[in-house]
Amino acid sequence: MTCEDAHLNMHDYISGELAAEQQKPLMDHMDECPNCREFFRQTANIQTTMRDFMQYKAPHELQNAVSSILANA
Amino acid sequence: MKSKRRKIFEKEVLGHLDRLYGYAMHLCKNGEDASDLVQDTYLNALKSEKQYSIGTNAGAWLFTIMRNTFLNRIRRMSRKPAGMAGEWIEQMAREDVSELRKHGPDPSVKCLDNLLKEDIARAIEDLPDEFKDTVILCDVQGFSYADIATILDIPIGTVRSRIHRGRLILRNLLADWKNVAMGGS
C-alpha cells in the first residue's frame, strides 16, 4: 500500500467506513510507516476532541416545548 | 388516545433531540434560533409523519428535515448562511489534496496533541460551509457517508471527498495557529 492509499483509507477508517478486508493492509502499512502512523494519530485525535467538545444537551425549556408539540399534535 | 404507531414514532424522534439541538447550534450560531429551528423541525416532522417508516433511520430523516427547514428560512431571509470562509481558506479548499498534506506530520505539529475547545470551535467556523457541514455530520454527529449523502442531497463520493479534504483543512488550520502560538515559523 502506498502512503497515498493509506491516507485515503485512514479517513474512511476513522469514519467507520473502511471495509474489513482493507483494514489489515492499512494497519500493516502504518506499522511500517511512522509518518502515516503519526498522521493517523493526529487526525483521529482531532476527531475525538471535536466530538467531545461539540456535544450539546437540549435546554429544559426546549425539551418541554418539543414534548408539548408532540403531545398536542 | 394515541395509536401504538404514534407512541413509537414519538419515542423514536424524541431520542434525537440533543443531537438535533447540537446541529441546530452549528447552523444558527445561537441558542435562541437553534431552539426555534428544533421546534420547527419537529413540527415539520409531524406534518410528514406518514412518510416515515417506524424502525428505520429517524436520525437521518430528522436531520434532513432540519436542514431543509433551515435552508427555507435562509431563503426567506435572503441572506447567506453565517460562517463565510476567508480568502486564504477558500484557496486551501481549492488546493490539490497532495498540497494540503505538505503540512506534516513533522515535529512542529506535535502541538496538535493539546487542543483547546476554542481552537476547535474557531477552526470549524473557518471551514468553508460545504466542508463544515460534512465534517460535523460525520465526526460530531456520527452519521454514515450514506446518511450524510441523504441529508445533504449530494452523491456519496462527494461526501467522502469533502470529509477527506475538510479534515485536512481543519488540521492545517490548527497546525498553523498552534505553530504560531508556540513561536514556530
Image (tube, coloured by chain):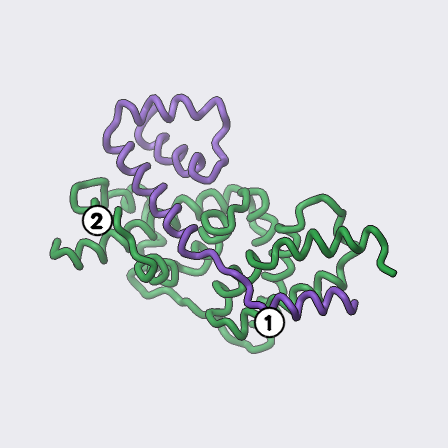
Return the x and y of residue A40 as percentages of the image width and height. 32, 37
Give the spatial CA distance, label 2 vs label 1.
40 Å
- In the rendered image, the quadrant that contains the N terminus of chain A is top left
Q: Residue at x 36, y 41 (%)?
A: A44
Given residues A12 and B141, the one toward you in this image is B141
Return the x and y of residue B59 as percentages of the image width and height. 62, 51
In the rendered image, the vertical position of residue B142 relative to residue B65, given as above or below: above
Viewed as shown, does residue B174 lie left or right of B121?
Answer: left
Chain in green on the image: B
Q: Residue at x 67, y 66 (%)?
A: A66
Q: Chain of mark 1?
A: A
**Visual hue assigned to chain A:** purple
Residue lying farthest right?
B1
In the rendered image, the vertical position of residue A54 relative to residue A3, given as above or below: below
Q: Amino acid at mark 2?
A: Cys
Q: Amino acid at mark 1?
A: Glu
Q: Are marks 2 and 1 in contact (CB under 8 Å)?
A: no
Q: Which residue is mark 2?
A: B111
Q: Which residue is mark 1?
A: A61
Return the x and y of residue B161 as percentages of the image width and height. 44, 44
